[in-house]
Image (cartoon, helix red, strand yellow):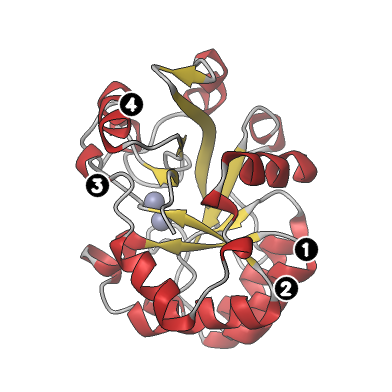
Amino acid sequence: MNIKIDTHVHTIASGHAYSTFYEYVQIAKQKGLEMFALTDHGPMMPGASHLYHLSNQVIIPEVVEGVEILKGVEANIVNSKGEIDVPNYVLKKLDLVIASLHPPCIKPANTDENTLTLMETIKSGKVDIIGHPGNKTYEIHQYDFVKMIKKYEMAIEINSGSFVGSRADSWDNCVNIARLAKDIGAYVTTGSDAHIHYRIGEFEKIYQIFKIVDFPEKLVITSSKDKLKSFLRNRR
Ligand SMILES: [Zn+2]
Ligand SMILES: [Zn+2]
């Protein structure tokens, strides 16, 4: 597999990332990426931008210097009802919505409670992808989670940024979740979670996971632009 789509990228607008949109476009071109999604953090993350930053992405062209751009967000799940910090009128303007659990925005709970929170987010229908569910800080019942993702025809993110920095111990969880996704037939996306442009499209660890579990390309919705676009269209 040679994946040319990265669905998870942060610019300086996230507050703790270091590169601009233009820098991402330049390096995406250099690396031969076909498409990436801008997914700056939702407003509850300390240092994140105002909601206007997210909604105003409509001004960004669909294709910049040959690279297709998806306008998105990594929303924060903020409570046990699974609610996120981005309102519907903003979500409506976006191509792609990731929701994730982050310590500044929701306290880690026990495995049952973390799972129920994600279930509520999935059921809300507002989100396309659950970000980095292998995070050890928020252990979940992986089988129930993957079943639910499949039922709601959403996608699970395999996040290559998880193996450096704050989630470096999540390898085993990520391998298990990928194996379950294969067995249950749930879709996955590939996200670098880059907070600096050099890391966009860095998928080595993801390829390793795919190899370990012999993951089928048909379930990787980022393996082609058409596949990803039709997945997102069907969800709107
Ligand atoms: Zn995140
Ligand atoms: Zn992120």
Nearest to the eye among marks 4 and 1: give it.
Answer: 4
> Residue at 36% across / 51% down in the picture?
193
Q: Is residue 85 visible?
A: no
- In three-dimensional space, the C-alpha distance between marks 3 and 2, rounded to whole angstroms, equals 31 Å
Instruction: Give the amino acid type for the residue marked by disc 4 in the picture.
Output: Val
Residue at numbered disc 1: 152
- In three-dimensional space, the C-alpha distance between marks 4 and 1, rounded to whole angstroms, equals 32 Å
- Marks 1 and 2 close (CB-CB < 8 Å): yes
- In three-dimensional space, the C-alpha distance between marks 4 and 3, rounded to whole angstroms, equals 12 Å
- Marks 3 and 2 close (CB-CB < 8 Å): no
Residue at numbered disc 3: 199
- Marks 1 and 3 close (CB-CB < 8 Å): no
Residue 84 lies left or right of residue 48; in this view the side is right
Instruction: Give the amino acid type for the residue marked by disc 2 in the picture.
Output: Met
- In the figure, 158 relative to 110: above or below? above
The location of residue 36, given as percent across then percent down, is 44, 37
- As helix, strand or loop, the secondary structure at mark 1 comes to loop
- In three-dimensional space, the C-alpha distance between marks 1 and 3, rounded to whole angstroms, equals 31 Å
Q: Is residue 30 visible?
A: yes
Of the image marks 3 and 2, the number of the one nearer the N terminus = 2
Disc sitting over residue 148 in the figure: 2
The answer to which of 28 and 214 lies nearer the viewer is 214
Residue at numbered disc 4: 25
- As helix, strand or loop, the secondary structure at mark 4 comes to helix
> Residue at 65% across / 76% down in the picture?
146
The answer to which of 40 and 227 lies nearer the viewer is 227
- In the figure, 112 relative to 131: above or below? below
